[in-house]
Each structure stands twice: as structure tokens, then as C-alpha cells.
Amino acid sequence: MKLELRFFASIREALGVSQESVAIPDNLKTIADLRSYLVARGNPWSEVLADGKVLRCALNQHMVDASTPLQDGAEVAFFPPVTGG
Amino acid sequence: MPIKIQESDFDLSAEIATLRKGDPRVGAVVTFLGTVRDMNDGSQVKGMTLEHYPGMTEKALEEILDQAKARWDIYNTLVIHRVGPLLPEDQIVLVAVTSAHRGEAFSACEFIMDYLKTAAPFWKKEDTPEGIKWVDARVTDEAAMARWAKK
């Protein structure tokens, strides 16, 4: 499955990446699976996306929770809780 | 229901005039104007930079305005949110709602603002004497949003 990953704010800075195209194994089904897959890359991923960190995720630019199924060709974004207004 | 994400400043009077122009049904205009403070969580703030998620920001705000329109009897809505570098006293966000009577407009305006605070992808980074730091989300913002679900 191919995905377009996006990272914002403190997550983007800590990873040093704002956007990345990835091809992931077919056994990854949900946002949570994708997060674990990225954590397995080691530092800085393991630290920035670690389980204890409070993150928000968006699938095709809609906020979703960790159990949401991935879709081929989707844009998946990880970012900290929002602080606008 | 215009939504504008922009670096440039805006003129409150001009925006309201445009929003209600040609609609004689309007008897109430409620606005919320957010401005940059020079103090946050005990730190002096010299300036800030606002980042957002282009594309998703507009979608999230459209969804918020749609919900407000479905919930209250309002006519028109406007959201302007600035991004990029800002200084204390600068205008940062404007939410405006028109309706026949004030009650609906007050509620809708507050709802839009509370929702924006927790669901629209903006992030503030502050320049303080202790260094540059990302602002943490407030628990009180989540609580402000949650109370709309109970009604």
C-alpha cells in the first residue's frame, strides 16, 4: 500500500521531515499499525511517535482515531494537539 | 460563509460590512476577535509564528461552520485566521455570525470558536526569553468543546 505521510509543528521539527511517500507492507491495516511501523524505524521515530506521546492523526485531511483503517493512496498526517485561535 | 487563511491583517469594520451587506433580515451580528497577548503560562511572549495544514484547515473550518448552521438559525458566517509571524497586540482570528436575533448568533459564534480551538489544524510557536517553544494544548479548550455535546 502506498501512502503520503505529512508531519506538522513539533512533530515535523523533531523528525526533520515534513512529507514522505512510503510503500508499506500489506499487513498494516490501521493508523495504529502505521504508527508502530514508523516507531520500529528507531530514533528519532521511536521517540517522537512513542505510545505515550499525545498525537492527533488525519486521514485524507480529516481527523481520525488510531483504529481507523488505512486506504491505498491516502494522505496520512501526524501532528500534536492543535493550538490555534 | 467565507473562510480566509492569510498572513495579512484584516479590517474588522470592513469585514462585517461585507458580511451583512444586502441582507435586511439581519438583526444581529456577533463577532469574536482574538489578539496576541504578551504573556502565556508565565512567560513573556515577544512574538509567535502560526503554522497550519493547508487544505485540511479549510475543510475543518467548513465542517465547523456547517455544523453551526445546522444547529442555529443563522444567516452568514465568516472565519479569518492569520498564519505566519505575529506580534503582541496583533489580530489573530475573527469569527463573525449574522442572524435575526442575538441569542442564536452569540451561541453559534461561541460554538465555532470552541470547536476551532480543538479541531482546526493550527499550531502556535512562541518566542520567549527562555527560547522558542511550541504552545501546549489546553485541557480547558477540550472542556469548552465538550460542553456543546451535552446540549
Image (spheres, coloured by chain):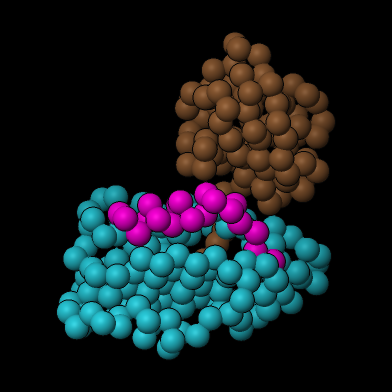
Chain colours: A brown, B cyan
Residue A24 x %, y %? 67, 19
Q: As displayed, is residue A22 above or below residue A62?
A: above
- Quarter of the picture holding the C terminus of chain B: bottom left
Determine the residue located farthest toward the front in the rendered image: B22
- Give residue B86's quadrant in the image: bottom right
- Give residue B115's quadrant in the image: bottom left
Q: Is residue B34 in sight in this rendering?
A: yes
B146 drawn magenta: no
Q: Is residue B101 in sight in this rendering?
A: no
Viewer-proximal residue, A83 or B54?
B54
B58 drawn magenta: yes
**Residue at x-position 53% and y-position 81%:** B10
Viewer-proximal residue, B140 or B125?
B125
Q: Which residues are magenta?
A: B49-67
**Residue at x-position 52% and y-position 29%:** A66
- Give residue A4's quadrant in the image: top right
